[in-house]
Image (spheres, coloured by chain):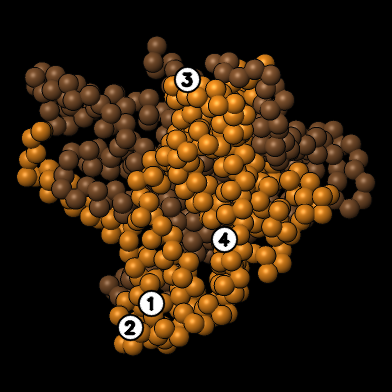
Chain colours: A orange, B brown
């Protein structure tokens, strides 16, 4: 191991702690204050609440339509995820396990998508959805979410499937199984680790998405969590503690998700950034 | 790897759904954007060919150039804020200190939280009357330092930049840390034998070893800076008086607030063009240094 001087350690820890504090304090401050009465907060934003005001949460859940937004986010996120991973896995299977004309080009085409900035497609997508009468429906989000995450999904899955030994399918072929049967019962099961990565990535990207939702969704009943929250905070300016309670409700699940799946999330999002 | 024969149709069938969604919604629209950008259209009436009119109008609009300036500020913030800070944190975490894992977990947290949430939380930090920052300044007796952080154009871009660094620097930290951990142990041992230690080794050996990854980080940071939208849209909406507007917000406003689809499309093409130009310049610079 390398030598470490005491002085170096002292500075390293000071710097890292400062960084950690700056990362945590805004969230911590928000969570603490979300339990206060509005007057209590206005009087001193740095004290701990005298009594935990859980009523803030009940009220925020109600006023901010949190149940509607959560449900919408869940639906849009999971349907997009399912479609993306299924279609992506299928495409990756054919791209990695078969030889055919235009194979390289097809693969390249899929990769190109990682370079496409969303805003360069925003206006045409809005107009396409309008033409298809899909504007302000779940599909107006599911389709773009799928389209924009197919690239990364195909990229990760193709890379993984390509590594399987060549004779893997042979037993299936000898049993007379068709191409799709082999995909479903031989290839897909052993792709699980990579599937887990793309599922987690798709989940977090879809769950957090804002711009498409902002442009394509207008009805309150269809708003996703990010859009609904942004709206709520914009309207409910009178009560900061209520805003904080609403934000905390949205924050907790994602923090739990992060802490549970930290390794895959960190590795996946980093790979996504570097490859994109 | 011809494992199966006579499967052309199966292959086509398997690729078709993914391709159609992907091409139809992620690729074709870029071409459409280019097409609309040459049109004069408000979405209701009929389209009329406008040639390069939209581009000429955009390039002679001061508000557009203000948004370009703000994009440059965000880009520079990424380059002088996120990248060095991320690298420094990665170098510290790479030293095998106890508790590194906790710092990494905390550092990456803002990357996982949605940009909407990050923006809303920072909006509360910067809130003029009851925000964290002004309250803190008041508490330690620095009332004179209290500012309208987002509403005063002297401070608004700085405030946004700080939130932008906070949001992303953990990502670069992790990217660089992964590269640092890939440096073979022999390299460090050889450096040790040559008497290169501490800062000297870091500057002469460690950092050059991860130069490739730093370049990737730089390119990513730049392309990200052109895509910035959520953070500013929610914190200030581009205000006060366009002072914090970036190109994506300018595009959003032209198309979806003022219903000028042709004009907005032209903006989006310009954003794409600018980012491609800057990135290819950076790539060329990086390659020249290699030679």
Q: Mark 4: which secondary structure?
A: helix
What whole-number distance in Å separates the C-alpha atoms at marks 1 and 2? 7 Å
**Which label is found at residue A167?**
3
Q: Position of residue A220 (x, y in %)?
A: 68, 69
Local crowd size for mark 1, using a 10 Å CA cut-off: few (<14), some (14–19), many (≥20): many
Counting residues from the start of the chain, the first of labels 1 and 2 encountered is 1
Residue at the disc numbered 1: A33
Q: Position of residue B237 (x, y in %)?
A: 60, 59
Please name the residue shown 22% across and 41% down the image: B92
Q: Which chain is home to disc 3?
A: A
Please name the residue shown 58% across and 15% down the image: B2
Residue at the disc numbered 2: A49
Q: How many marks?
A: 4
Q: Are marks 3 and 4 on the same chain?
A: yes
What whole-number distance in Å separates the C-alpha atoms at marks 3 and 4? 40 Å
Circle nearer the viewer, 1 or 3: 3
Circle nearer the viewer, 2 or 3: 3
Circle nearer the viewer, 1 or 4: 4
Specify whether residue B7 is in view.
yes
Q: Are marks 2 and 4 on the same chain?
A: yes
């Amino acid at each position: 191991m390398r030598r470490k001087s005491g002085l170096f350690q002292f500075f390293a820890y000071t710097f890292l702690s400062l960084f950690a504090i700056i990362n945590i304090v805004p969230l911590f401050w928000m969570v603490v204050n979300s339990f206060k009465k509005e007057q209590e907060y206005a009087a001193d934003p740095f004290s701990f609440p005298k009594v935990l005001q859980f009523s803030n949460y009940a009220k925020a859940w109600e006023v901010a339509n949190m149940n509607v937004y959560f449900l919408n986010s869940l639906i849009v996120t999971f349907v997009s995820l399912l479609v993306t991973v299924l279609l992506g896995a299928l495409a990756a299977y054919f791209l990695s396990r078969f030889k055919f004309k235009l194979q390289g080009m097809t693969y390249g085409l899929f990769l190109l998508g990682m370079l496409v900035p969303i805003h360069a497609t925003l206006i045409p997508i809005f107009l396409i959805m309008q033409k298809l009468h899909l504007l302000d429906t779940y599909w107006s989000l599911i389709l773009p979410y799928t389209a924009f995450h197919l690239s990364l999904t195909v990229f990760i899955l193709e890379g993984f499937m390509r590594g399987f030994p060549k004779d893997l399918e042979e037993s299936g072929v000898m049993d007379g199984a068709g191409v799709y049967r082999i995909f479903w019962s031989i290839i897909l099961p052993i792709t699980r680790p990579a599937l887990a990565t793309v599922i987690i990535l798709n989940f977090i990207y879809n769950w957090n998405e804002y711009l498409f939702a902002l442009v394509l969704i207008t009805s309150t009943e269809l708003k996703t969590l990010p859009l609904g929250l942004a709206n709520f905070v914009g309207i409910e300016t009178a009560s900061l503690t209520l805003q904080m309670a609403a934000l905390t409700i949205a924050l907790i699940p994602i923090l739990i998700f992060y802490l549970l799946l930290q390794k895959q999330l960190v590795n996946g999002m980093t790979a996504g950034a570097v490859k994109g | 790897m011809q494992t199966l024969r006579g499967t052309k149709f199966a292959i086509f069938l398997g690729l078709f759904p993914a391709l159609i969604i992907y091409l139809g919604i992620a690729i074709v629209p870029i071409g459409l954007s280019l097409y609309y950008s040459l049109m004069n259209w408000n979405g209701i009436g009929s389209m009329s060919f406008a040639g390069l009119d939209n581009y000429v109008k955009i390039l002679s609009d001061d508000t557009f150039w203000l948004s370009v300036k703000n994009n440059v500020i965000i880009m520079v913030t990424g380059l002088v804020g996120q990248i060095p800070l991320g690298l420094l944190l990665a170098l510290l975490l790479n030293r095998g200190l106890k508790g590194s894992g906790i710092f990494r977990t905390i550092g990456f947290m803002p990357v996982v939280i949605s940009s909407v949430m990050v923006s809303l939380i920072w909006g509360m930090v910067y809130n003029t009357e009851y925000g964290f920052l002004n309250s803190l300044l008041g508490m330690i007796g620095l009332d004179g330092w209290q500012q309208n952080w987002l509403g005063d154009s002297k401070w608004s871009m700085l405030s946004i930049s700080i939130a932008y660094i906070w949001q992303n620097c953990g990502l670069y930290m992790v990217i660089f840390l992964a590269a640092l951990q890939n440096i073979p142990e022999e390299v460090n041992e050889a450096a040790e034998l040559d008497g290169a230690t501490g800062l000297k080794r870091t500057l002469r050996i460690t950092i050059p070893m991860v130069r490739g990854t730093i370049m990737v980080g730089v390119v990513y940071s730049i392309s990200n800076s052109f895509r910035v939208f959520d953070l500013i849209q929610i914190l200030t909406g581009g205000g006060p008086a366009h002072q914090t507007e970036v190109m994506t917000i300018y595009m959003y406003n032209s198309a979806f607030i003022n219903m000028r689809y042709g004009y907005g499309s032209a903006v989006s093409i310009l954003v794409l063009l600018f980012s491609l130009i800057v990135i290819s310049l950076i790539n060329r610079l990086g390659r020249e240094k290699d030679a």
